[in-house]
Image (tube, coloured by chain):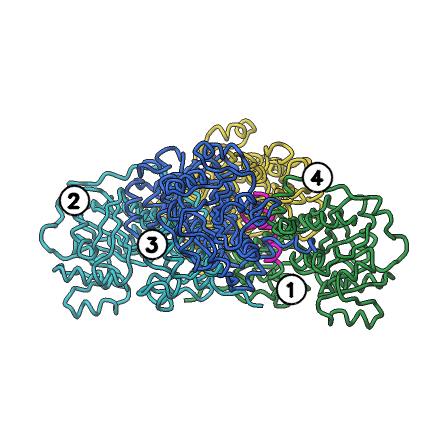
Chain colours: A blue, B cyan, C green, D yellow
Amino acid sequence: MAASLWFRGAAFSRRYWSRRLQPPATNLAAVCSRSMASKTPVGFIGLGNMGNPMAKNLTKHGYPLIIYDVFPDACKEFQDLGEQVVSSPADVAERADRIITMLPTSINAVEAYTGTNGILKKVKKGSLLIDSSTIDPAVSKELAKEVEKMGAVFMDAPVSGGVGAARSGNLTFMVGGVEDEFAAAQELLGCMGSNVVYCGAVGTGQAAKICNNMLLAISMIGTAEAMNLGIRLGLDPKLLAKILNMSSGRCWSSDTYNPVPGVMDGVPSANNYQGGFGTTLMAKDLGLAQDSATSTKSPILLGSLAHQIYRMMCAKGYSKKDFSSVFQFLREEETF
Amino acid sequence: MAASLWFRGAAFSRRYWSRRLQPPATNLAAVCSRSMASKTPVGFIGLGNMGNPMAKNLTKHGYPLIIYDVFPDACKEFQDLGEQVVSSPADVAERADRIITMLPTSINAVEAYTGTNGILKKVKKGSLLIDSSTIDPAVSKELAKEVEKMGAVFMDAPVSGGVGAARSGNLTFMVGGVEDEFAAAQELLGCMGSNVVYCGAVGTGQAAKICNNMLLAISMIGTAEAMNLGIRLGLDPKLLAKILNMSSGRCWSSDTYNPVPGVMDGVPSANNYQGGFGTTLMAKDLGLAQDSATSTKSPILLGSLAHQIYRMMCAKGYSKKDFSSVFQFLREEETF
Amino acid sequence: MAASLWFRGAAFSRRYWSRRLQPPATNLAAVCSRSMASKTPVGFIGLGNMGNPMAKNLTKHGYPLIIYDVFPDACKEFQDLGEQVVSSPADVAERADRIITMLPTSINAVEAYTGTNGILKKVKKGSLLIDSSTIDPAVSKELAKEVEKMGAVFMDAPVSGGVGAARSGNLTFMVGGVEDEFAAAQELLGCMGSNVVYCGAVGTGQAAKICNNMLLAISMIGTAEAMNLGIRLGLDPKLLAKILNMSSGRCWSSDTYNPVPGVMDGVPSANNYQGGFGTTLMAKDLGLAQDSATSTKSPILLGSLAHQIYRMMCAKGYSKKDFSSVFQFLREEETF
Amino acid sequence: MAASLWFRGAAFSRRYWSRRLQPPATNLAAVCSRSMASKTPVGFIGLGNMGNPMAKNLTKHGYPLIIYDVFPDACKEFQDLGEQVVSSPADVAERADRIITMLPTSINAVEAYTGTNGILKKVKKGSLLIDSSTIDPAVSKELAKEVEKMGAVFMDAPVSGGVGAARSGNLTFMVGGVEDEFAAAQELLGCMGSNVVYCGAVGTGQAAKICNNMLLAISMIGTAEAMNLGIRLGLDPKLLAKILNMSSGRCWSSDTYNPVPGVMDGVPSANNYQGGFGTTLMAKDLGLAQDSATSTKSPILLGSLAHQIYRMMCAKGYSKKDFSSVFQFLREEETF
């Protein structure tokens, strides 16, 4: 019996879910029993670069935390602040009926929810589980299904904005899940972000993020190509940026985050591409877009090539630079 | 005999000019003798879809016209309005010392300037010749050189904006040429456009336009891919557009000219992709970008693929549709 | 406990296996108890277009069959021939200790092995399970691991060659698995194919097939592009093919399976692209290549674009044509 | 003055010739007066890496040479051998009625034929002018037209094979021009190459070479991608190459010039990618393919991307390595 359970995974769930367009109805009776009004403890799993400042913003809003991270050191700071540190996701679930997870990959998320000591081992009926990791939407859907079986509620709520936005509480959350639960999610997410957007059924939060980041990668590379070509044709970079920004070539990458050093202040291109959104992270998100496109048979000609370009950049020493360093990558002159 | 001099084309001039980075100094003495203050006749060559409304806007501002078009019918309307129609570009040059040319391709422009009965046959010293055609910047540079030999001034001033903007006098002109002459060009171009932008030496007007349109093509295809992927992943198109437009995926193609039917009003996607900027024209501009990139050895990975995509669309029945129809092109479902 | 088993799947196994480079040791004691010398019954699961002629070749070599297919009709022909038809993969495993599976997708394979009535429910210790489906190598590895837990042996052995080669017993098998078991696999596979190639550890059979087909797709599209460009530049197609084939452009797609009608006889291009290897199947294999490349972070710039091209062709009416019809797809002329 | 006539370049001639599909008839009366039977002097212009050994092979076959190179040093060796060195292409044309030109770019070829002291200044009626440079076929066509006006004959005959083949007289010549003159060309070209292939009208020699090299670039990159992916999936490189070479992925790049170090002996990949066909030269040929495709509106999706990849390699330190070094370029591992 267990064996048959085993081999479903991303590939399977994609196909499975594409046939079941309707998300499963939530067990509302169970849901209603969850504490919401008062500031009862909130679970937080994953205290990395992003999770750390996010969790702190929750404490600033008065929420006691029950925390867990696979690296005990990541919890120490919170322990010193008086928050409760436990030794597994299951233990978090035993003590909190609202839990936020912020993990680096699909596999970490799956482990945190369904592992030997995962959340699902001790989750209470009616709990609200919000996953802010950026993962394959097909995995989000599958997690939601398992959570639902336990009588709890799952929402995917990936974020846009980096460490700076996490610190200042200005993240954007893209939220997928049962609409009736959105207000409950918003109560917590609003402490960490300035925009909390409802996107639709479970998985659509991930979908929105993936689509945005794919388009971002495409327009960033496009901006880099156009700026580089223009410069080689004799145009002044600042003037070219100004022209693009008043014309139909305008995009966020040209008017807010221009990749050419000297064109704008306060962006990574003005600081040797330090900080910002790393090339490795962009390559990861494009990999998710690629997976989603393959499974839904959606042609993404430019998205696919953008993925390969960021993949190459990771192998050519750009992995830790901001993703706008694609300008530098393309700019190198031919030498003989 | 001289005419044949003229047809040096792109391949040659690219290499030639890449060795001569400095544009030739203009003969200022000659230039100063040109009439500028009063509304003396202005020559206009090329009265097509764009040239016709542009020329009309000049007459509205009180400029008498000396006009020529290879298709006599294109001139009839102006003749009826009392404008002077002549039988060759040379004849235009004999009667006007400010001339605007608006032609479909590099070869037409070369013919108009350097053909057997071309402008250069009778151009007066000090004349101002403004070419608003969209052509290879290398050809613009070469034309400028020949014009300069005759003691006249050449500027490239391609336009952005379609027939509607031409009619309402709201075109954007991107102008390349000697800066001292920009004011003189602006006097005329300002009658036909609401933006007249100085871009630098001769050829940079073309360069700016080519770079803008390449980035436009890339972000349009990117928007179409992202919207299509999002829809297949279960997102509502309007909501997805809204999310992109408040995020880093924002671009002119997503927020002003969205390619998905039903998302915006008053754009070609709301009207079965009628009107707007045709796929064939975009393919042409991308061909110019490709030529410029090849000759300057600039990598344009996405630009090059965008070129191929619009090339294919032209062959699949999309040639007359607006270039945002790439969404429709990508959207078609697999059938078995 | 069961829950934690659940969510592993393709995404998980990729990462998991990349850390465990050594395949698990096989339980040799168990293996030795399997019957090999005499022609005991062989199980066959999946009697589709390919499985049907493959199974028949086994009977021609004197092997009695125990067969199963989800579509009972597919078994009827064999029943009439006196072969034993059973009602589930588990029932096959109960009656045969050598089983061949030939299924269309990863999910079908997973179901056949690990489903409620899957092979693993009743597999005998020491059985040899050979999967000839073309699936994600990461799934093959995971199946192998589960099979091993039951004390049996799993090998992946995808085929190259179409229905014709299946009928004539001329398939090529690319086999991954424990080398000690290769001879046992060869005994059966040699009845159905003329080439049985040992590729290495489990999953390498799939890897070899995927790599071959990706290169095939790339050179086919490349051949189509080169032939089309040459024809438009004035070359005679037969002459161009001859030149390529005596030069460094030579490839299987140019010299054995030329995509241009009129160049060769007896190939799909000579028959309106009927028969051969369908565009849909190529798109599927390229999807597997894409998945494998993403998970191993291998840049496949051309492979990725080839995937998108076949994806588009599927949506433009080419899904049932041979994959060499990409020539026709590219050839269409621009019309105005 | 006439010289300037000559520099009509690619852009113009493309459009011009696309309207004049029939090549001009040759003046046969004039042609017949040319010396052919005895070994009269042959002109050779361009004694670079390729031209030098080619010219030497002509002397080995007993042809006296009249030579010219823009770099006098390149001629010294021949002067020492007793060949006649002159000071311009015109002087070559004055002394020889069969001339071979071997120059690096279109512009050099145009200069040699139509420059102030170009061949056409003193070409004799009936002379046979063979251009072995690799240039834009549109330029070849235009040169042919000018040559014809002088009553002489022009053929394009680009070579395949590198410096080694040039030394050993084993080049392949792809010849375009009037078929009646092919035998005359063959007499000379056969001294320098082992294959002399007639391709059709003027320009088709270039077209054949460009198409071959585009397909070569595509299959080389494809081979590199497939080998790299296979290795990362656990396959042994030699075994994978063997499998591809017996399957449908087989191509010249996999079976004769494998790009993976250790797979074959005697190829550039076995020698740190020294020697062979340089990345810069491949990038140049792909630029010609791109130009030809743009002007004939032929979609070359993979060809175009291959061009961009070789363009990038030139900027990343691979310009002097053999073009099979694309394997090394793709192989670099991601580091963090």
Nearest to the observer: residue B246 or residue D111: B246
Residue C22's disc number: 4
Helix, strand or loop at mark 4: loop
Q: Disc 3 marks which residue?
A: B252
**Dots 2, 3 in contact, CB < 8 A:** no
> In this image, A185 relative to C305: left or right?
left
Helix, strand or loop at mark 2: helix
Helix, strand or loop at mark 1: helix
**Dots 4, 3 in contact, CB < 8 A:** no
Q: CA distance from mark 1 to mark 3?
A: 45 Å
Type of amino acid at the residue the image marks with label 1: Pro
| Viewer-nearest of discs 1 and 3 | 3
> In this image, D20 relative to D276: left or right?
left
Within 10 Å of disc 4 (Cα), the crowding (few <14, some 14-19, many 20+) is few
- Does D193 appear above or below A77? below
The percent position of residue A97, horizontal first and vertical second, equals: 49, 49
Q: CA distance from mark 2 to mark 3?
A: 40 Å
Type of amino acid at the residue the image marks with label 2: Val
**Is residue C291 part of the magenta span, yes or no?**
yes
Residue at 52%, 37% in the rendered image: A315
Q: Disc 1 marks which residue?
A: C268
Q: CA distance from mark 1 to mark 4?
A: 42 Å
Q: Chain of mark 1?
A: C
The percent position of residue C67, horizontal first and vertical second, equals: 79, 64
Type of amino acid at the residue the image marks with label 4: Gln
Q: Disc 2 marks which residue?
A: B31
Q: CA distance from mark 2 to mark 1?
A: 68 Å
